Amino acid sequence: MKEHLINDRAALKERVDAKRAAVLDWLKGESFTSPQLLAEMLGLQRNATYKTIRSLKKEGLVDIVTLTWITGQIHLVVLTAHGAAMCIDPENPVEVQYYQQGRVAASSIAHQLDVQRAKLKALRAGWRDWVPDQRAHQLAGAEPEKWLKAPDVVATNPKGLRVAIEIERTIKSRKRYEKIIGLYLQMIRAGLIKRVDYVTPDPAVAPRLAAVIRSLQSVLVGPEQGPSQRVSITDAHRERFNFYSLEDWPNG
């Protein structure tokens, strides 16, 4: 009986440690998230999720921040400076970003939470090699002659295709899309990516965004900063761009 209780305690501790590690691993890549996203990621109910969050908060690894938006209050689970330091691998000491209140705009927070929702869905659908916005910008900075545009995400789908993913909350001007699509077509031609998936949190945005981009007859080709030339766009070009609501994405 005693041995059975010891085994039960050991199994319970293993489950608790696994949940704590999963939360820290998620925040290591994101620096902040919502309790709802953590619950979905862990596959737990609200109370069980908050129990894990509180245990990490007690050790100073995470904190809970409340922000007030026009739509009401939002709660974030954030990685602290101590938590970020504890996430560093001593054998490979790469800096881990932590949340600094007031340094991230509300619009950026909303956008990043949408990116995280997409990430959860993609990983469950078998996508891999997820490269988030910050790392994508590092790639663009290191090889600006290749990465002409830094996507919100770069990832590999189950078919092995490298895909640039843009989480689009609002629709930009036609002039801006002429430039963006031109940059992406150059990256596709260079073999960096195979296609671009535009994903919209609002389902009403996706078909309208598709209509705007697919109606383009020409695009600007050239570096992000510098002289460009106008090039006609064909149906073959348009086929490289897909449009989904976040609810429906990913689709292969």
Image: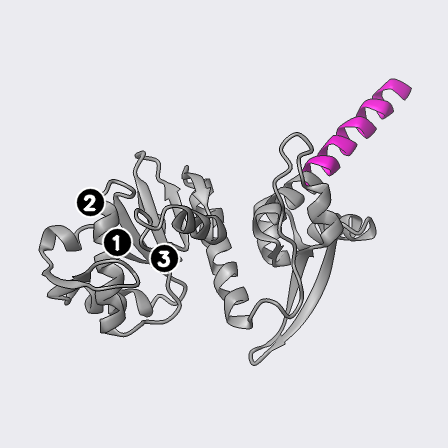
Tell me if 214 is positioned left or right of 72 in this view.
Answer: left
Q: Is residue 161 visible to us here?
A: yes
Q: Write down the residue under mark 1.
A: 184
Main secondary structure found in the magenta portion: helix
Looking at this view, is 56 or 152 the one in front? Answer: 152
In this rendered view, identify the residue nearer to me: 70 or 96.
96
Q: Amino acid at mark 3?
A: Glu
Residue at image mark 2: 189
| Residue 49 image offset from top left, x and y in percent | 69, 50
Question: 231 left or right of 209?
Answer: left
Asked whether the residues under the numbered discs 3 and 2 touch, taking CB atoms below 8 Å apart as contact, a structural biologist would say no
Asked if residue 9 lies in the magenta stretch, the reply is: yes
Q: Residue at x 65, y 72 (%)?
A: 67
Span shown in magenta: 1-19
From this view, report whether residue 159 is shown above or below residue 167.
above
- Please tell me which residue is depicted at 23% across the width and 59% down the height of the picture: 181
Direction from residue 77 to residue 126 in the image, left or right: left
Cα distance between the residues tagged 3 and 2: 19 Å
Element assignment for label 3: strand
Disc 2 residue type (three-letter): Arg
- Residue at the image position 23 percent from the left and 72 percent from the top: 175
Looking at this view, name the residue that lies furthest to the right: 2
Classify mark 3: residues with Cα within 10 Å, few (<14), some (14-19) or many (20+): some
Left or right, 19 with respect to 36, comes to: right
| Residue for badge 3 | 166
Q: Nearer the viewer, residue 90 or 212?
A: 90
Q: CA distance from mark 3 to mark 1?
A: 11 Å
Q: Assess disc 1: are there few (<14), some (14-19) or many (≥20) residues with their C-alpha within 10 Å of its C-alpha.
A: many
What residue is shown at x 40% (from left), y 39% (from top)? 127
Q: Nearer the viewer, residue 252 or 192?
A: 192
